[in-house]
Amino acid sequence: MSKIAFSLTLLFAGLAQAQPSLKTVPVPQATGTGQYVRDNAALVVLGKALFWDMQLGSDGRTACATCHFHAGADHRSQNQLSNPNFAFPANATLTSADFPFHALTDPTNNNSRVLHDNSARFGSAGVFPRKFTAINLASGDDGYDLASAFNLNGLNVRQVTARNAPSVFNAIFNARNFWDGRALNTFALTGSTNASLASQAVGPPTNAVEMSYDGLTWQLLGQRMLALNPLRLQRVAADDSVLGPFANPDGPGFTSPLTYLTLVQSAFAPAYWQTAPEDNFQMIFGLALQAYQTTLVSDDTPFDRFAAGNTAALTAQEQAGLALFRGRAQCAACHAGAEFTLASVANINRRVGGRNNNNNSIGDTGFFRTGVTPLADDAGLTAGAFKTPGLRNIEFTGPYFHNGGQATLEQVVEFYNRGGDFPQGGVNNDIRRLNLNANERAQLVAFLKALSDDRVRYQRAPFDHPALCVPNGQTDLAQTTDARFSLSADDRMAAIPAVGKSGAKAPLQTFSDLLDGVGTDGSRAHTLTEACPVQ
């Protein structure tokens, strides 16, 4: 071996050690749940069923997975815009020409002439704006339409969240969740630590934009869900890695007479379901969803194999990208460790001398302002700071940033190369012009794609799932046929087929694939072109 080759081998070995395989990082486990949970395996079953069940939403069509069905994120392109500050086009369908939201004549220079600037946020379509009146076990909750900015030609369309949906895969490593960190490490209902995902889980189900009609309470939601057959409208693969033993072989849902109450009885201590279990449903839901999401760890990527000692696992281009990532590009200053974020439990504990991260007592570690949007547009945690996301499977989780303003990884790298878009008001010290050439930028993108796990790419266990139908905008603005909601437009629903533990034949579509129509020939999964079988 030549001296140069030997030196490069030592360099790349050092890079691997600096950011080890995720397999070396213990998965954070919630503390203090023993008095509540009697069977953790049953808890995971309950959590996965609840996460994917369309019956959870007030409309009977919206699951947690509706905004997290695609590599743990959401890559729909129609009716995904919102803007709390300015007017925006409701029900718009975005194309590749709409990205980046802040487009410049010279993408390497943030002082060059602006071609177009879109102050809207690319979020996720939630529920129609409605007032709750009563639970309904048959066809979604009863209620009535409310006036809304999400309106076109006199008909309401679905409301859209104010921030882009981050991936739930590997989110168990985050000390705090949501872009602004408001889902704290301690789950208030049980006092459990390492439980940010439980804190996060109990936010959307009664949120009147994301999942429920205005006025639905946790007790009423629990009363409805506990009586239902899990996944009653959705097919479950017989070889689903978690739910397969419960799948109805003759149709959708679980085998009769299983209900959510029977799943709760298997997972939780009797004290929490013997009397008025609906009163404990918020706690039950939070712990169940955390248990399921704890299993969604993607730690088998080319990078992980390289970090474990297989120097052939990354190509020369990917290794050059890793060197840039840790070197001149300074990406690892924020995207640190095997989790690729300073905001992880392990990284925070190391920085504070091993102390546990209780709530936000250790400050705002891992939250930075990077100049994605003007300071006044979205304060984030404070002063425009947002949580540094992990980068695993980022190939499939576009669009990017809290505003969803970048469609491709190439655009993301260009953003950092020019030192951000809106540095006025101050940004993190590592956000500055990098002066990377085209070849170096391509090397960085190649490395980022080496953070994809093939189990995610092909939806293999533990990333397999039941069937799902997702609202995908309103095409012809026809009035809904549901007589209760005469001011609402009819949905266009797209099917996400069920997959078992062996996964799908085709890889997931990327967001740019979706925008460009790539994969509708069957070469990609989740193209949103398959009609929904659920009425």
Image (cartoon, rainbow, N blue to C red):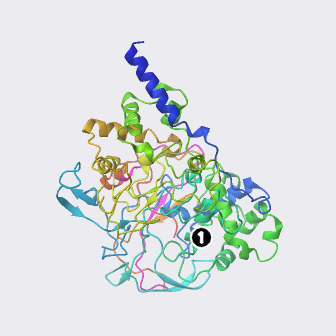
> Image check: 85 left or right of 437?
right
Q: Residue furthest top?
A: 1
Q: Which quarter of the rendering shows the N terminus? A: top left
Answer whether residue 507 is magenta in the image: yes
Position of residue 4 measured from the top left corner of the image (x, y, whole percent): 37, 17
> Image check: 484 left or right of 523?
right
The residue nearer to you, when weighing 110 against 320, is 110
Q: In the figure, residue 422 lies in which quadrant?
A: bottom left
Does residue 437 sit above or below 80 in this rendering? above
Position of residue 198 measured from the top left corner of the image (x, y, whole percent): 63, 62
Does residue 100 sit above or below 312 in this rendering? below
Q: Residue 250: tell me if it is visible.
A: no
Does residue 468 sit above or below 320 in this rendering? below
Q: Read off the magenta span.
A: 484-511
Instruction: Indicate the amino acid at tag 1.
Output: Leu
> Image check: 504 left or right of 250?
left
The residue nearer to you, when weighing 167 against 20, is 20
